[in-house]
Amino acid sequence: MSAIADGRFAPCALIPIYNHKDTIARTVQALRTHGLPVLVVDDGSDEATRAVLDALAREIDGMQLLRLPHNQGKGRALSAGLLAAREAGYSHALQIDADGQHDTADVPRFLATARAEPRALVCGQPIYDDSVPRARLYGRYVTHVCVWMETLSLAIRDSMCGYRLYPLADTCAEIARAPLPARMDFDTEIAVRLAWRGLPVRNLPTRVIYPENGLSHFRMLRDNLRISAMHTRLLFGMLPRAPGLVWRRFRTPRQEPR
């Protein structure tokens, strides 16, 4: 795979996948139209999805397939993909889901924001239509409030959106510093920890849909318990960092979103 390089700015796209065989081709092809190399991390998918991925890897120039030996969870797939992207020489990775939820027309906006501010974590801020499940929507607001307490900041507008662009140097250093969650709680914890690390956060409004008959791997009880445990851990982690977080807000007020 060849990187798109602009000085030190060399981004790729990163797609974790588990059994989304019906939507992955459209997502990869849409990303390639923007010139992005694509790294797909197969998190132990079933045989039918593996066959689709193998065919895409043969047919689509600029797509690389990384296959995990068995299903380990979204967080493990993302950690593996971020480390692989860094090892391959990329400077940034645009995370996007495989299920067609995210609007690939916004890819240039993510790239332009990161190119202008290479150390920023660029987070999608979802704009939902009527397809969003009400329970999921209300649950997100609880997480928003927890994240604002954990960072003592309103900088991260939505920590659960799986459409974001990571600066790989800081992100991989954080992965190496301490293990990250293996499953759905990865997105929120890495965003909080990168904010603790001092990365500026930029939020981009982007349309998010829930496709009809879409395949979701979110398990209401199990994943909500994981998320609750994560917030408890992060709130305790915030306490020794609180003086530094408060000082940072007064020292660099322009990093807060308006």
Image (spheres, grey):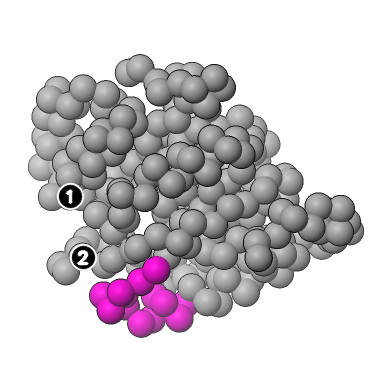
Q: Give the range drawn in magenta.
A: 127-139
**Residue in the image at 56% along x and 22% along y:** 8
Q: Residue 81 has which mark?
A: none
Amino acid type assigned to the residue bearing label 1 in the image: Thr
Residue highlighted by disc 2: 211
Picture layout, residue 47 above or below residue 61: below
User: Looking at the image, do the residues carrying marks 2 and 1 touch, with CB atoms under 8 Å apart?
Assistant: yes
Camera sees residue 184: no
Lateral position of residue 109 relative to residue 32, left or right: right
**Residue in the image at 22% along x and 61% along y:** 215
Disc 1 element: loop
Q: How crowded is mark 2: few (under 14 residues within 10 Å), some or many (20 or more)?
A: few
Residue highlighted by disc 1: 23
* Image quarter hosting the C terminus: bottom right
Distance between mark 2 and mark 1 Cα atoms? 10 Å
Q: How many labels does the image show?
A: 2
Examine the structure image and report whether residue 110 is included in the region drawn in magenta.
no
Camera sees residue 101: yes
Amino acid type assigned to the residue bearing label 2 in the image: Pro
